[in-house]
Amino acid sequence: MLVFGFGQLYAQKTIVINDTVPEHIFKSDEIVCLEDASNKLTFGEISSSVFHNRFQKNINYYPKNYNRSSSYWYRVKVNFTKDLNRATVIEFFDQITDHIEAYMPDDNGIYRQSKTGADLNFTDRLYKHKNFEFLVNSTKKGEYYYYFKVKSKDQVNVIIVFRTVERFIQYGLTEYFTYGFFYGMIVIFSFHNLLMFIAVKRRQYLFYILYILSVGLYEMSTDGIAFQYLWPKHPVWNEYAYGVALYFISSFGLIFTKELLHVKVKAPRLNQLINVLLIARLAFFLLCLFYNNDWFKYKFLEFIPLSVGFYTGIYIWWKKQYRPARFFVLGYFFLFLGFVIKVIHILGWARHIPGALGYYSLTFGFLLEMVLLSFAIGDQVRLLKKKKENARKQIIKQMQVNADLKDSINRELEVKVAERTREVQQQAEELLQQNITIEHQNEELLSKNTLLEQQAEEISRMNILLEKDNITLKTNIEKVTDARVNATELDFDEFSQKYPDRDSCYKFLADMKWEHGYKCIKCGNSSYCNGKVPFNRRCTKCAYEESVLHQTIFENNRIPINKAFYLVYLMYNHKGAISSHKLSEKLGIRQSTCWTYAAKVKKVMEERKKDLKGVGKSGWSKLVLDKQA
């Protein structure tokens, strides 16, 4: 009853479905999972009674594949309280999941396999939809277990949703309508700013067009829309598309920031920082593209250019009092907020944030940013017009003043040019002298570096010689110790140098016991792994763990193993003629215990008298193994 109660305490939660439930999102303890690090487990093994209780509870709001080299098996339990009599689907949300296998029973209880994922052509999907759907084979009354195998090179959120087909169609139409609105706005903004670029010839419009088009490409890549409509037969492009789009977003975003806010003039240091960041971002992009595209997954690095752009806008608006920057700051605020909410949602820390807001937070942020950046551009245009009018008035006034000051200015310029020429010549002479000094210093440094390299080579050579001497000395010590153990009777301290602790004794027993290979005594399997106790071996097939002491003279031993070794050693050297009082004195163990163990060893010596004949001083080690083993 206790075992049954304990099992019920950790039983998987059953989800009850009836006609009033159009959809259900599985979360938290409604999903159990099992990691397959070997990637070799089959559905037959996973669904067997052996593995039934090995599934673990999901600790997060949504499960994740933390180890991206492993396969993960997920199981949900559904109870249909009555026949639904309508088609239903199981849907997975994360569009970058590489491979999903579903195993769902039909009306006869036979499990049917279905496959999908971002690694397959889009045309191979059951429904031509950006998410992954599986048709539920049976909706008759009863309890069902659904199994899903997920493997992905990227870490994904395993969001499993049960939906009726009616709800799926309604949800899909609404979602695609929203995407159409979003991408339509991108096209409209791009076309409007293209006309402005043609009319005004200001580069900021061109960079803004490239920026919002990059936003559109990134959103299409992450939403699966690009895979559906742009490259449905080339799933490998999914591994590069979002990374390329992110690079264009951060690069064109920073360049647009420089052009719109005149960062080079208003904040030279921030301009240098942005230039360095653009070079670093290009280097990282090239590494991801040509060396390891797996690095594209580090999308959180976009926090750096986003923060730099946000801070630049705040600085120029607050410190330089540049009015168009206020819309820029407001737009980046919404983008920054959307980025933070998206990260919190991905990490599973925002359980109280509505799912749609958390999932589409970055899209909302991009949308608001595009609108507000357009306001910033318009505000800048109005400011430029006002500046041009003021400049025209100032030009007319200045032309009148210039006529009077032209001659005096020219004379002053001639004097200043002469002075500046002398300063430049003097600085050139100083630079020449500094270059000569630097050349001398470089020559000294080169000579010192050469000397240091020679010393380093000599030290390295000496270290190699010392290491060889240490290895030789250590080998000689071990040989001398073995020789003394086999040649003369040692006291316990000397004997302990060879077998100082439990691990050294267990290692000696394991090497001798499985000298000719391991074989499970239960099933005969020859494959094993480490057991709970050091040097024990556990069968990988039947999980039986064999103790290193099993079938040895030390089985059920109750005294320290190194003292038991020494007791066997003394008994063998004295041919069983040493008294239990003498053993008690040498080992520091009670006389009665010594007598018991001595009798056991003496019995084994009598039984193996013929086998031990002529083996010499090392024959004591032949006593430890069971003769049958």
Image (spheres, rainbow, N blue to C red):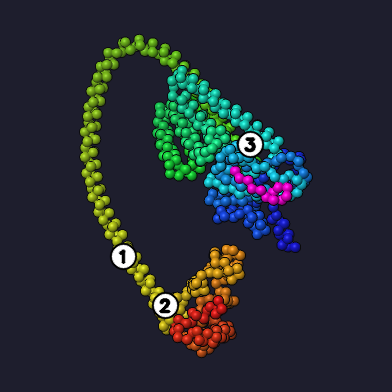
Q: How many residues crowd around disc 2 within 10 Å: few (fewer than 14), some, or many (20 or more)? A: some
Residue at point 48% right, 36% down? Answer: 244
Secondary structure beneath label 2: helix
Within-10-Å neighbours for mark 1: few <14, some 14–19, many 20+ = few
Residue lying at 41% horizontally and 80% vertically, measured from the top left: 484
Give the label on residue 356, or none. Answer: 3
- Element class at badge 1: helix
Question: Magenta span has 107?
Answer: yes
Residue 311 visible in the picture: no
Q: Amino acid at mark 1?
A: Leu
Disc 3 on helix, strand or loop? helix
The magenta segment is: 105-116
> Could you say which is closer to the camera, residue 223 or residue 495?
223
Alpha carbon of mark 2 to alpha carbon of mark 3: how far?
73 Å
Choose the circle earlier in sequence order: 1 or 3: 3
Q: Amino acid at mark 2?
A: Asp
- Mark 3 residue type: Ala
**What is the quadrant of the N terminus in the image?**
bottom right
Q: Residue under label 1, please give it.
A: 465
* Image location (x, y in percent) of residue 362: 57, 35
Q: Where 174 sits versus 390, above or below?
A: below
Q: x, y (%) of residue 186?
A: 54, 27
Taking depth in this image into account, of 610 and 241 the one nearest to the observer is: 610
